[in-house]
Amino acid sequence: MSVVEILKALLPDLESQQERDENYLATSEDDADLERRLHELDDRGRDVPAQAIALGLYER
């Protein structure tokens, strides 16, 4: 049994990031809201400088 399977068994209500993103997009009000949310998810993490990532100096 893998670690992921154990975690899923212990925490069945825990959603993956993909599931959370899909649910977030599914609750959009209209096309404009959906487009804004898509851009928001696409831009997530881009404000972290590349050097910080290389040095491990970013929030996890």
Image (cartoon, grey):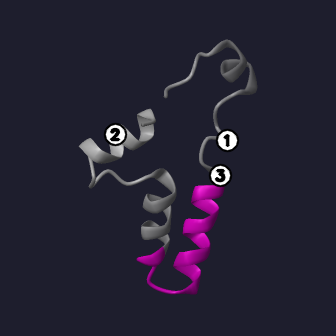
* Residue 7 numbered mark, or none: 2
State how far apart marks 1 and 2 are (Cα): 29 Å
Residue at x 70% of width, y 27% of height: 49
Q: Quick one: 9 or 44, which is closer to the camera?
A: 9
Residue 45 on image: x %, y %: 61, 41
Residue at x 58% of width, y 57% of height: 41
Give the residues drawn in magenta, as a range: 26-42
Q: Which residue is mark 1?
A: 46
Task: Tell me the element at label 2.
Answer: helix
Task: Tell me the element at label 3.
Answer: helix
Mark 1 crowd level (few <14, some 14–19, many ≥20, 10 Å Cα): few
* Residue 43 numbered mark, or none: 3
16 left or right of 8? right
Residue 57 on image: x %, y %: 59, 16
Q: Residue furthest front?
A: 1
> Which comes before the other along the chain, label 3 or label 2?
2
As for residue 38 lying within the magenta part, the answer is: yes
